[in-house]
Amino acid sequence: MIRLPISLAALCLTASAFAAAPFDDKFRQLDELLPTPGAIRTASGAPGHAYWQQRADYTIRATLDEERRAINGSGTITYYNNSPDTLKYLWLQLDQNIYKPDSDARQSATVASRQAWEKPRSPAEGLKFDGMRSMLTAAEFPGGFNITSVKDSGGRTLPYTINKTMMRIDLPQPLKPGARVSFNVAWNYNINEQKVLGGRSGYEKFDDKNDLFEIAQWFPRMAAYYDVYGWQHKQFLGAGEFTLEFGDYDVQITVPADHIVASTGELQNPGEVLTAAQRDRLKQARTAKKPVIIATQAEAEAREKQRTGGTKTWHFKARNVRDFAFATSRKFIWDAQGIKSGNVDVMAMSYYPKEGNPLWEKYSTHAIVHTIEQYNKYSLDYPYPVSISVNGPVGGMEYPMITFNGPRPVKDKKTGELTYSKRTKYGLIGVIIHEVGHNYFPMIVNSDERQWTWMDEGLNSFVQSLAQEAWEEDWSEMRGHPRQIVDYMRSRNQVPIMTNSESLLQFGNNAYAKPAAALNILRETVLGRELFDFAFKEYAQRWKFKRPTPADFFRTMEDASGTDLDWFWRGWFYTTDAVDVSLDGITEYTVASKDPEVEKAWQRARKQAEPISITDQRNKGMERRVDRFPELKDFYNEHDDFTVTNKDRNKFNETMADLEDWEKELLKSGKHLTLVDFTNKGGLVTPLIVEIELKSGKKYIERIPAEVWRYSPTRITKLFITDEPVVGMVQDPYWETADIDVSNNAWPRKSEPSRLELFKSERDQNNLMRDYNTKLKTKEQKEDAKSE
């Protein structure tokens, strides 16, 4: 321990006592967080003159073994090294390996909590039957890729190493910049039952003994190699999705002859796989104003029952896509409608089993068309010739040109009646908008989903909300509206948006809802629609068919809007702070006129407005001595402290003689000056939206930029100037900033109405004798109870 002289120690204590508190600068720039810009990614957020990205072309031949529920495939991958680097090996993604019993996804899985496992507080918290089935099946299911060969273009075996969900191929010669290499891979794997093991693909089995297959992540895919991370070979654990390279695909898929296939790409051999009637209907659909049925429900039901033998091979080609998926079943009904997207003719198509009707036939293709119309408006023209929505076991998932979507009507087991809830209807339209919207983000604006979920889910959820607004008025429960995320912003178990995809807490709120709401606030409250829409579209145009990072998005939005938004990105994306602005002290001032006639009258009125003491109230009317003897009254009984004297008048006249004309006008302005204290309790700086109510009943809004907090991020005092007294004030009257506590947003404070629910006391609950003698229900009674 070091001992200081007393005088020196005292000096140190004095200095520390008066040292300034650390200043939390909410408006400091993001320079210490964002990567340094350069020739590849510029400071403006645009791709630089040295920007590069890799490319991979695929030729694949695959067969669906329906009986075994398995895929057998082989293909040639041609990889183009457009980087400035020499590559000695290549990495590929083997996403099906997540279904191996010893995968990291299985081994690292945990239960939510011991309490929820052992003693759930409600059925919603408890372990479900299907949850237990999933856990038991996962331990036994023989999933994952079986790689049977890896060879170069000359047929020579290439050495490879499988590291869980990744595979490294060692090249015989280093791949130099500008060079390309081709190699062949053969594989097979067992398809998982999606409703048991979950995931983004799989099969669904129906009571009529038919299956519906949604096939994705079904072939070894090139991992991304790019300037920011090098090889993106983070293990696939289930949450972080995919980042892939663009390329051309030539794919032939062999399936049972009575199947219909929906796929990424354009069908190359319709004459071999479609009937003449189906080809004619497709031709009609190209110019139709509403969906045309290509394969009818009656035809689908006939295929379900007849089950013809043999196989057919469907041939598809797709240009400049980053992935390839397909769906196949003999159960498919198929409808289509042609639309125009910029200069591209697009076929919007839906595939669904009869179990999806009447909902799917009515809404699915309309939702595809609507999505393309709306997303084109806010981002870029949809560039592909096909956009497909498939109804199957996957609740919602996207791939280039094709999406898997889940909601269906329900069938009453007793009456056979088909019905659907409001939630199912809007859930279907919403999920189709969302998944088709993913063709823009990230299938075209190709962000790294394995690293940043919000860059595709958050941006897409935001544009989805704009598209839903354009579908019909009063769409409820919409992600993107700030008021929808208040409960989440209050919660403690959250992490910043800028957290890796596999480490997110409250996945849906963090990666979907919060960034969508943040962008809504940026559009409506911070920038305004004109500036925001221009900047957002500029981002989509700059980065279409390229791979942006968060920094590219942040910088482009600032560059194109002409606005410093570092405070916004820092608060909303890098912290878990919340908006909670409290409207505290309010004081009204008016300018003193200096005229004693006016000022002393004002002082007298103030005095008279004070509460009368309880003693004076009770003594009112009491006989006083001066009432009995009036001669006791004098000058001071006729005048009070507010009497204007000649001295006051002389002083006023002298004062006015020394004033300039503009100074005299100020004294007569009659303005009301109201000082208001605002406290930032949540930590997240925000614009202030203040509704002011005047004595006359007039209300108006003042919008104050977030920079009002730049000198003091915790408490500020703001001046409001009005022509009449302010009688009421509300901060954030439209709930547009996601303020987590609106009870402190108003002056005067407002009570919050609520309802108290009363319950009847329950007695004699555990009566064993009564329960033992209760009659058993018949089968019919059980069915009636289920249908109620």
Image: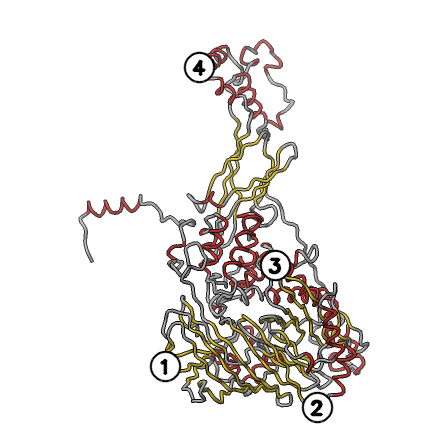
Residue at the spot of label 4: 658
Mark 3 vs mark 4: in front = 3
Mark 3 vs mark 2, CA separation in Å: 44 Å
Residue 26 in sight: yes
Single out the mark in the foreground, 2 or 1. Answer: 1
Q: Earlier in the sequence, mark 3 or mark 4?
A: 3
Image spot of residue 260 (x, y percent): 69, 80
Type of colouring: secondary structure
Q: Is residue 577 above or below residue 178?
A: above
Marked residue nearer the N-terminal end (3 or 1)? 1
Viewer-proximal residue among 416 and 725? 416
Distance from the alpha carbon under mark 4 to that under mark 2: 109 Å
Question: Which is more N-terminal, label 2 or label 4?
Answer: 2
Residue 173, which numbered label?
A: 1
Tell me the element at label 2: loop
Q: Disc 1 marks which amino acid? A: Gln
Residue located beneath label 2 in the image: 309
Crowding around mark 4 (Cα neighbors within 10 Å: few <14, some 14 to 19, many 20+) is: few
Residue 212 image point, x, y percent: 67, 81
Return the residue at label 3.
Answer: 376
**3D distance between C-alphas at marks 3 and 4:** 68 Å
Q: Are marks 4 and 2 in contact (CB under 8 Å)?
A: no
Badge 3 amino acid? Asn
| Label 4: element kind | loop
